[in-house]
Every structure is written in structure tokens, then in C-alpha cells.
Amino acid sequence: MSIFIIAEAGVNHNGSIELAKALIDVAAHSGADAVKFQTFKADKLVSKTAQKASYQKETTDADESQYAMIKKLELDERAHHALIDHCKKKNILFLSTAFDHESIDLLNHLGMEIFKIPSGEITNLPYLRHIGSLKKEVILSTGMATLDEIDAALHVLTTEGTAKEKITILHATTEYPCPIEEVNLRAMDTIRETFDIRVGYSDHTRGIEVPIAAAAMGASVIEKHFTLDRQMEGPDHKASLEPDELIAMVQAIRNIEKALGDGIKQPSPSEMKNIPIARKSIVASRAIQKGERLSAENITVKRPALGISPMLWDEIIGTIASKNYHEDEAI
């Protein structure tokens, strides 16, 4: 099955529809399967006194409240229609993460078939119930979560009617950028084994090597933030890929996908022709007369593999030469 690559635009549009469309263009050009935004009402998401995360203070006005920051990044219903239409033109799937009930209803009304649950909502029971009741495909991020919290969220989603087969769990580390030593990619395997479920990886590291490694480890979904320019002002630009890096990441993952193959160990079509060249056969190590007994003194093993396999050495030793052989002639 093809690895589903989500190019995470998030709020890197800075509130501009034109920037958002440019991000869609980049995602489509990269070969990603989907481009994902964020849908929220600031009034429903955060209290007016809420502080910013430390990484947000470093990348935006430190004196500005979290509410004031995200209020500028809202996308209204009209904007959603414009972005969905642009995605259709560019032949890429539109996705968005809902952060409140009103936003869930909007995205459902707009016909979105895959609902991405962000890490921060994994302990939000009413939110999980709402998503679960839609019975759509679900991608669940698990940054900051324990196995018990993942188990509880899964229980809510399935109890509300979403089939387990429709759920993919993403391993993630909620820090921007994520320190390389805190990635813990093996946790993806732990989640797969514990819950017998499809897994993937949402990456917040700098660079592209970690999501490529996750693809090689069997991730079915890869999500990665991208931007038009890391120097732009805004909370997530610094931890995002620039367009050429996104293209490189997608291409590398597609190559990994091909390289993973079907798991059947057998000679590949291209290497069949090399079998006689690289392997060996039993040959005369010197001239041998007809009637002479074959032994380690007069036969040896050399390339090419056009004669008897060396695996039959024991059966050939002690037999009688049925003809004359010259040196290096296959027995």
C-alpha cells in the first residue's frame, strides 16, 4: 500500500488566502497526497489569558497573547471553499485539522473524508466522541501521549462507531523543532504491536532524514510541516521544510516505498542475468584424461556458473571422467 504523505501547511498561510493557495501549489508540485490546514475559531479554542508555548514566543511577538496570535490565523468558511476548489484544480486532497466542535461540523459539511485529530485533543473526550460519531477515516496524532491515553482515545472513537480499520495512529513528539534524540521512532513499532493497528509518523524535526527513516520502518502515513520561507513571521515557519526540501522528502519516501518491495526473497528480474557471471561451477584444475578419477587434485571451483553447481562437490568427488577435459573446462 502506498505511503500517504501529508504536506502540513497548518497556519503557515499567515491568514492570507493567496499564501494558502501558493502552499497548495507547492504541495501539489512535491507529489504529496494531501495538503493540510487548520480549522478553528479562536474564541472556542483558547482563553484570552492563555500563554504561548516557548517556541511560539521565540518565533512571534512575545508580548502578544496566544489568542491574539491565532485570531489572525483563522480561515472562515469562504476561505475553505476557495482552498478546496484550488486543491481540486491542482489534483491534491484538501485536509484540515479541526480544533473545536463548530470546526468539526464545518469540515464534515464540506465533505472532508479524513479527520486528523491533533495531539492536543487526545484527552478531549467530547471532541473524540464527536469525531468518532462521524464514522470517517481518522488519523490520530499521539504527541505527549502515553499508551494508556492512546488506548482510552481509541476506545472512545470505536465506541462511538468508527471502525478500528479506519484509524491510523501517528507517533509524534510535540516540540518544534523536535530534538533528534527525542524522536524515539521505535515507539511507532510499539504502538503497532500494542494495538494491532496502522501506524505512521508526524515529524517535527529539522530536515528530512527522520521521516524517510519512518517510511523505511513501515509508516503508512507521513506528515511534515512546510512553508514557502522559513524566515517568515509566524509560529511554525522555523520548524518547517522549504519547497525544495519538501520535494526531496517526498521523492525519497517514494523511492523507499519502491525499495521496500513485497518481502518475497527470490532473484529479482534484473539480477537473473548475473547468476552465471557471479556464481561458480566445478571445472578441471588441470588436464584430465577420460577414465581418470575426479578428486580435489584435478577439479576446482571457478566462474562462470555454466556447469555443475559446487553444491554437488561431494557427489562429483570419486566419480570417473567420462571424457578428456582441458584446464578450466566445466565438468
Image (tube, rainbow, N blue to C red):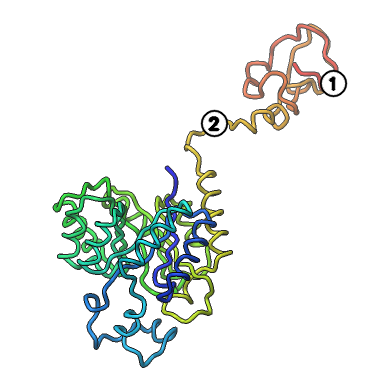
Q: Residue at x 51, y 34 (%)?
A: 265
Q: Position of residue 130 (x, y in %)?
A: 17, 60
**Residue 150 in the image, given as x and y percentages of width and height:** 24, 60
> Of helix, strand and loop, which one carries label 1?
loop
Q: Which residue is mark 2?
A: 266
Quarter of the figure that contains the N terminus: top left
Number of residues whose C-alpha sits closer than 10 Å to that of mark 1, classed few (under 14), some (14–19) or many (20 or more): some
Rendered residue at 43%/74% (across/down): 16
Which image quadrant for residue 29? bottom right
In this view, 184 is above or below 168: below
Q: Amino acid at mark 2?
A: Gln
Q: Is residue 29 at all visible to an observer of this figure?
A: yes
| Count of all numbered marks drawn on residues in the image | 2
Q: Position of residue 286 (x, y in %)?
A: 84, 21
Q: Position of residue 91 (x, y in %)?
A: 46, 51
> Tag 1 or tag 2, which sits nearer the N-term?
2
Residue at numbered disc 1: 327
Query: On residue 56, which mark appears?
Result: none
Q: CA distance from mark 2 to mark 1?
A: 34 Å
Dot 2, crowdedness within 10 Å: few (<14), some or many (≥20)? few
Mark 2 or 1: the one toward you: 2
Instruction: Kindly tell me whether residue 178 is visible in this rendering.
Output: no
Q: Contact (CB < 8 A) between labels 2 and 1? A: no
Most extreme residue toward the bottom is 63
The residue drawn where x is 14% and y is 53% is 160
**38 to the left or right of 326:** left
Q: What's under tag 1, amino acid-wise?
A: Glu
Vertical order, 248 against 290 (above or below): below
